[in-house]
Amino acid sequence: MAEALRKSVPPAREEAPDTPRTPPIAPVAAPPPAHDRNAAHNRPRRRDRLRWALFALLPFALIIGCYWYVTGGEVMSTDDAYVEADKVGVSTDVSGIVKEVAVTENQHVTAGQVLYRLDPRQFQIALDNAKANLAQTALAIEAMKQDYKRMVSEAAAQQAQVDLDQVNYDRNAALLRSATVAQSVYDQSRYTLDNDKGKLAALREQAQVQLAKLGGDPDVDVTRHPQYLQAQAQVAEAQRQLDHTVITAPFAGTVTNVPAIAPGKYLAASTTAFFLVDTDHVWIDATPKETELTYVRPGQSVTVTVDTYPDRVWHGVVDSVSPAAAQEFSLLPAQNTSGNWVKVVQRVPMRVHLDTSDKTLPPLRAGMSVEVNVDTGHARGLPRFLTRWFGEARRDR
């Protein structure tokens, strides 16, 4: 077996002992082309020229920047501004069931247009009841007037009876002194006189009470009597509640959130049914920084760009500037009285009146973000630039 393996292995190649061994030859790199050597040689020169050109342009840039700063500053710009419009939650002061909704979502309505109606039956019943009470009050006042006249007439009749009793009493008193009549007759006449005088006084008091109910005037006009005026006020209140079952638009605008109500829904008094936005009268509420309001005055011209329409421009004027910063009206003003006080630039609300007479411009909607540019007409000027520059240099030292 071993013999067979030896025969199968080929004999190793034998080298001559005197043959010299040649080392491997390293590949020789080819020389770089001529144009690459020129590009590497010219690159530092090109950088030097660019550097010197930038250094040469630096004074011009400083001059241009200083000129822009000194002559600029006429326009105060702020992007913390939004479109605002009159908004009202449509509601009524009576409770009832919605009978009809007369508008649709995002519909434009005019002032006085019907928006929705409540079921008027209960209010109609209350109005009829108030009117019946008014008529009954008028009859009652007329009855009091007639009753007063009756009392006056009864008092006059009683006065005549008292006068007769006085005559009988005087006669019996004279006859009693001459013993012509009995003592009992005298006593009876005196009792009758006193009794009729009491009745007369009672009738007069009743007549005075009735006269007081008539306001001291027995011929008072029924429509001027307090009870009649009270009943008339109840009729007016019932009529007002009936009228308020029909809700109309207080001003022209666009209704929104209309699907919040539907026929058959019960609305409590003062519950907001939906909203009405006055899209025909809009303005801008901006809150620029206090340091930007140095030369802003009411009446200055304003240009407004809206984020929704970046290629359109609106014009207007500064309407007013708030007398206090916005944080003064917050629930918890940032009043830091401790020693680690940090000054924060405040923002002052400013209102801009827009000119929306150009109907070719797209409509503005409340809440849109805008950018306001106010032309103050007051450049920074060289004195302000020097003051600021020297102030910063003094702080750096």
Image (cartoon, rainbow, N blue to C red):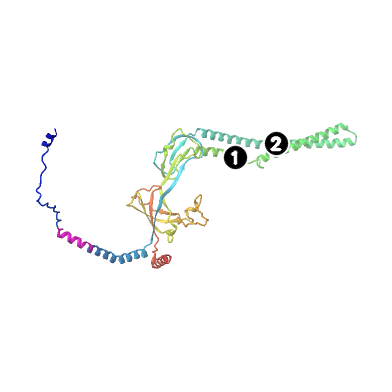
| Residue at mark 2 | 151
Start-end of magenta stretch: 31-44
Residue plotted at (29% across, 65% down): 55
Q: Where, quadrant-wise, is the C terminus in this rendering?
A: bottom left
Left or right? Give the position of 126 relative to 144. Answer: left
| Residue at mark 1 | 230
Q: Where, quadrant-wise, is the N terminus in this rendering?
A: top left
Q: Residues within 10 Å of mark 2 (few under 14, many from 20)?
A: some
- Nearer-the-camera pick, 217 or 387: 387
Type of the residue with mark 1: Gln
Q: In the rendering, at what x and y percent does residue 245 appear?
A: 48, 37
Q: In the rendering, at what x and y percent does residue 207 appear?
A: 70, 38
Q: In the rendering, at what x and y percent does residue 251 appear?
A: 44, 45
- Nearer-the-camera pick, 267 or 229: 267
Residue 250 seen by the camera: no
Left or right? Give the position of 59 relative to 297. Answer: left
Residue plotted at (38% across, 67% down): 382
